[in-house]
Image: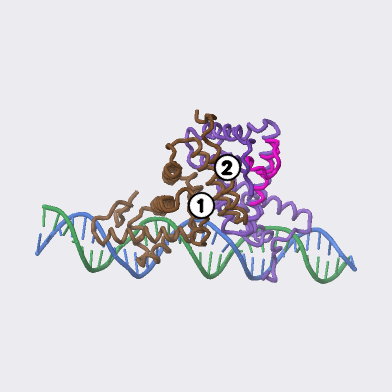
Chain colours: A brown, B purple, C blue, D green
Amino acid sequence: MTSRFTSRDGAAPRQARAVERRARLLQAAVELLTEGGFAALTHRAVAARARLPLAATTYYFASRDQLLTEAFAELVERDLADLQARLARHGPTALLATRDRTCDRIRQLGLWELYVHAGRDPALQRVARRWTDGCLSLLAAALGRPTGDPTVRLAYAALSALWLEHLVEQRHDGPAEAAALLHTLLEIPSNPHQAAP
Amino acid sequence: MTSRFTSRDGAAPRQARAVERRARLLQAAVELLTEGGFAALTHRAVAARARLPLAATTYYFASRDQLLTEAFAELVERDLADLQARLARHGPTALLATRDRTCDRIRQLGLWELYVHAGRDPALQRVARRWTDGCLSLLAAALGRPTGDPTVRLAYAALSALWLEHLVEQRHDGPAEAAALLHTLLEIPSNPHQAAP
DNA sequence: GAAAAAGTGGTACGAATGTCCCACTCTAGT
DNA sequence: ACTAGAGTGGGACATTCGTACCACTTTTTC
């Protein structure tokens, strides 16, 4: 129940300056998420990062959950845009390029953290699906195969798991192993075996 | 630095009753983790679940992190035992059996949550590696292939990702799709392509 | 230009949390 | 038996959190 006092309850602001302030809060939320993950997203941290008073966060976003959901959605869109750009520049081999820089690792870790969390929150689940679908269609395009191609599906699954494993476990042989595995998988595909039901 | 007052700082207790109390706390922690995930593990919740006073939790475990690490390790061992039992009973097809019961889903979600979290915590990272290695060797054994077989590696990666995706996104077609994909992958493998470097 | 709505921000509240303190009771070793 | 240390438990502390309050200023609407 919305108080009879001030609060936009998450709806879009009407005044230009307010729109910009809301965007700044969202940007701050995204940054915090990429740097410290789920736990780092607090009203106070967001307000401080955006150099706005604490009350602004509860004015523009109905709850922490809403802030989290919107920030996750934004993060996913940016990740997809990144992936698309990398694929356009380096072709499918970009998939195997290890983005080892710490900031990227932490960011990806944050994304996966939210992804798993989405299993407990329907609002986040929609975003999680969007992420999967987006990656899948970008991958299909990069490999020059139709969307829904079983090989693409398989490659994406294997790639995700190996990538996540590398992010979490940080083993020395991660990237090379993934490259080798993917290479064999993508050599195999177009023989007469039929997959999809 | 350990206070000059009471605290075992995580070391094993000496008295029999104390050993049992510590085990009860750990058991409670595991249950909480499986039911509510990372966030549900608080000293107070553990103490209440174990029907022990709050101070017992800080007496037997030096910090929440230690409690978390030990509980995660226990959870992983139980998961591996589960998997082994299922494989022994139903053979490799057990991999494709969907464990759809809610309690299992939530438990698996908790495991993955901790797994991702392990990317930020070296103590948890060791447990994460143990989980991967354990699954990998069980899978290899079930498929009658040597440990380190590239096909096993690939199958495990694909299976994990599809399984996690199903847990998180809860799409209707998850299990069937996974079954079809895995089936084709495991039909393909032993042709002359060579994978590992 | 006045009334209504939108936006602003300092502050406060209640609920949790991790951890610590300390007086107390047992048990083990001598 | 006695004493040192292990174990016990009730309580408190400082911190952090999400969120609500409310007086105030600015913008929009009529």
Type of amino acid at the residue the image marks with label 2 = Thr
Type of amino acid at the residue the image marks with label 1 = Glu
| Magenta segment | B129-152
Tag 2 residue: A184
Q: Nearer the viewer, residue B68 or B25?
A: B68
Q: Nearer the viewer, residue A140 or A115?
A: A140
Determine the residue positioned at 37% across, 59% down: A27
| Chain containing the residue with disc 1 | A
Tell me: residue A103, above or below residue B141.
below
Q: Position of residue A126 (x, y in %)?
A: 42, 43
Tell me: residue B18, above or below residue B83.
below
Crowding near the residue tagged with mark 1, few <14, some 14–19, many ≥20 C-alpha atoms within 10 Å = many
Whole-angstrom CA distance, mark 2 to mark 1, is 30 Å
Q: Position of residue B52 (x, y in %)?
A: 66, 53
Q: Position of residue B88 (x, y in %)?
A: 71, 34
Q: Position of residue B187 (x, y in %)?
A: 61, 32
Q: Which of the two labelled residues, at mark 2 and mark 1, occupies the earlier sequence position? A: 1
Determine the residue positioned at 71% across, 63% down: B8
Q: Is residue A65 visible?
A: no
Q: Is residue B133 magenta?
A: yes
Tag 1 residue: A113
Mark 1 falls on what kind of element?
helix
Q: Is residue B184 magenta?
A: no
Magenta region's main secondary structure?
A: helix
In the rendering, which numbered label is found on residue A81?
A: none
Mark 2 falls on what kind of element?
helix
